[in-house]
Amino acid sequence: MGLLTIETADHVTTLTLNRPDTMNPLGAKGDGDAFAAACDAINTDMDVRCAILTGAGRAFSAGGDIKAMKERTGTFGGTAPEISDGYRNNIHKVLRALYGLRVPLIAAVNGPAIGLGCDLACLADMRIASARAKFGVTFLKLGIIPGDGGTWILPRIIGEARAAELFYTGDVIDAATAQEWGLVSRVVEGDRLMDEARALAAKVAAMPPHALRQAKNLMRQGRSISYDSALEMAANTQALMHLTEDHMEGIDALLEKRAPRFTGG
């Protein structure tokens, strides 16, 4: 079965992990290419202003394919250099594609997000969880290390100490704890999850598309540059935004006390 189903409506693209019978594992041949193609399509379509990532069935994603690990097949088979290349050319391709999205990404975490599944959720700009969601980075329990970049992203979200606790114990936390720790911004009942995600996406999609993408870029760059560099980037980017039609539309809407209608001009 193909990994993703893709739907676009009202400036929002929804990506759904679609292996519900096995809790949406990743690592099969072509998974990286599927994500790369989907994210490239979003990035090149200025009509798309926001994306949602969720899972079909009872899980968001259980992570790497345990059966394939047991049988040492596919991405998890071969010599050490072959396995290393499997990560680079497949699993890491999934992660790089999500990290490279130019539009804001919402993870609607409908169930367990474990290992690689947790890493996928962490790559989103915003995370909403079902009350049934659980989060864990349980790599050490399988005798392996976090191989998906989670040691880079998770401490940036919940802090070094809490990330270390999860990595070194393999503990799995519930949705309420995830919210308390700042891993998710809100927890809702399962039957309301997608409605909440779509409502949030609609607010994002109402923003001017060029400024929206540039704002995400500035936030991303701000992780690794000095404040002076951030100010310089902001000045240069802001100059371009002042010359757009959407800037004028925003001003007119404010003065006329109406909702703006941004078109990307």
Image (spheres, helix red, strand yellow):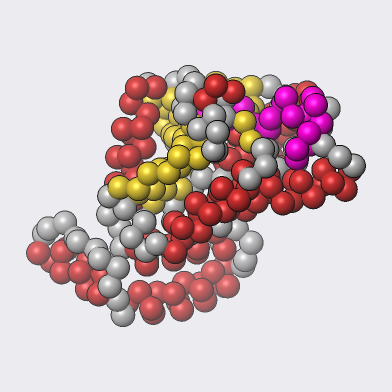
Q: Nearer the viewer, residue 219 or 2?
A: 2
Relative to 108, is 141 above or below? above
Residue 62 lies in what quarter of the image? top right
Residue 31 location, x and y as percent? 62, 43
Q: Is residue 135 left or right of residue 18?
A: right
Q: Is residue 254 magenta?
A: no
Question: Visible in this render: residue 140?
Answer: no
- x, y percentage for residue 58? 49, 21
Residue 108 in percent (x, y) is at 44, 35
Magenta residues, as a range? 60-76
Q: Which residue is at the far left?
A: 256
Numbered label tally? 0
Q: Is residue 186 left or right of residue 173?
A: left
Residue 73 part of the magenta segment = yes
Relative to 184, residue 10 above or below: below
Relative to the observer, which residue lies in front, 128 or 156? 128
* Quarter that holds the N terminus: top right
Q: Is residue 260 visible?
A: yes
Q: Where is residue 33 in the image (x, y as percent from the top left)?
A: 60, 51
Quarter occupied by the C terminus:
bottom left
- Residue at figure coordinates x 60%, y 58% from the top left: 223
The answer to which quarter of the image holds residue 200 is: top left
Q: In which quarter of the image is residue 66?
A: top right
Q: Which of 91 and 149 is in front in this view?
A: 91
Q: Residue at coordinates 75% horizontally, 40% vertically from top-left?
A: 75
State the residue at coordinates (50%, 40%). 4
Please tell me which residue is depicted at 39% across the width and 51% down the height of the picture.
Answer: 50
In the picture, measured across the screen, residue 84 lies left or right of residue 154, that is: right
92 vs 247: above or below: above
Farthest right residue? Answer: 79
